[in-house]
Amino acid sequence: DAFVSAALRQSHRCASALHGEVSLVIPVKLRDLQQKDKTAVMSMLRDPEVMRFLGPGRALTEDEANSWFESALTNPTRFAIAEADKDEFIGFCGIKQIDGVFDFGYFIRSEFWGNGIAAKACELAVERLSTEFDLDTVQVFIADDNVASKRVAQKLGWQATHSGSKDGEYGGYYRITM
């Protein structure tokens, strides 16, 4: 039937995208966070899908998101990911020190998911950070349920080193490779 055929074609396209056969649709760059990014950042931090595997595991309140943004603006840690041509804010990527441990992570506005942005941003960030950090000492934790981030790690060739838990989530710790 036509519906099943269309679903199978879509499934094949998704599978192809997972294996790196689809080129990056939206070119990206890394830059510093800017005041003009506030509306997009606030929206992202208040999106329960984006925040599912981050921080408290829930969308932030408006006050929490505002405090988070002001802190990130005055004390930057991770890079802002932006659309290369229009400079539109897309997300964050990089290293942040959490409880004395260098933690690599990223998060992207949900409307940009599925475009290869996370993998490209991670490549750019790792390239820049490799001169400042011993990447063997940097922690990358991916929750078991975070299938999209596991695909990003696989696409980048990052290897799971061991299982564990972080902030109540079970998952794997990965080694960054270039």
Image (spheres, rainbow, N blue to C red):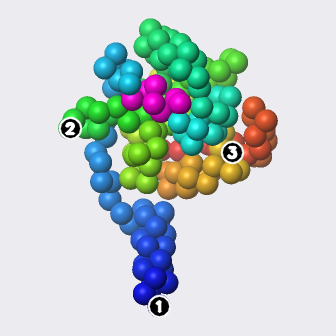
Q: Name the amino acid type tagged 3.
A: Ala
Q: Is residue 129 visible?
A: no
Residue 37 relative to residue 176: left or right: left
Residue located farthest toward the top when viewing the structure as drawn:
74
Kindly identify the residue that appears in the image at 70 percent across and 18 percent down: 99
Q: Is residue 73 visible?
A: yes
Residue 96 relative to residue 139: left or right: left
Please state which of residues 101 and 66 is positioned toward the viewer in this rendering: 66
Q: Pinpoint residue 8: horizontal percent, then vertical percent.
A: 48, 80
Tag 1, which secondary structure? loop
Q: Pinpoint residue 13: horizontal percent, then vertical percent.
A: 42, 71
Residue 130 covered by magenta stretch: no
CA distance for labels 3 and 1:
38 Å
- Disc on the earlier residue, 3 or 2: 2
Asked if the residue at tag 1 contacts the one at tag 3, i.e. Cβ–Cβ closer than 8 Å, the answer is: no
Q: Name the amino acid type tagged 2.
A: Asp
Asked if the residue at tag 1 contacts the one at tag 2, i.e. Cβ–Cβ closer than 8 Å, the answer is: no
CA distance for labels 2 and 1:
42 Å
Tag 2, which secondary structure? loop
Which residue in the protein does label 3 denote?
A: 143
Prevalent SS, magenta region: helix
Residue 1 numbered mark, or none:
1
Please state which of residues 51 and 94 is positioned toward the viewer in this rendering: 51
Magenta span of residues: 40-46
Which residue in the protein does label 2 denote?
A: 85
Q: Name the amino acid type tagged 1.
A: Asp
Asked if the residue at tag 2 contacts the one at tag 3, i.e. Cβ–Cβ closer than 8 Å, the answer is: no
Please state which of residues 94 and 90 is positioned toward the viewer in this rendering: 90
Kindly identify the residue that appears in the image at 65 percent across and 21 percent down: 98
Q: Nearer the viewer, mark 2 or mark 1?
A: 1
Kindly identify the residue that appears in the image at 65 percent across and 33 percent down: 58
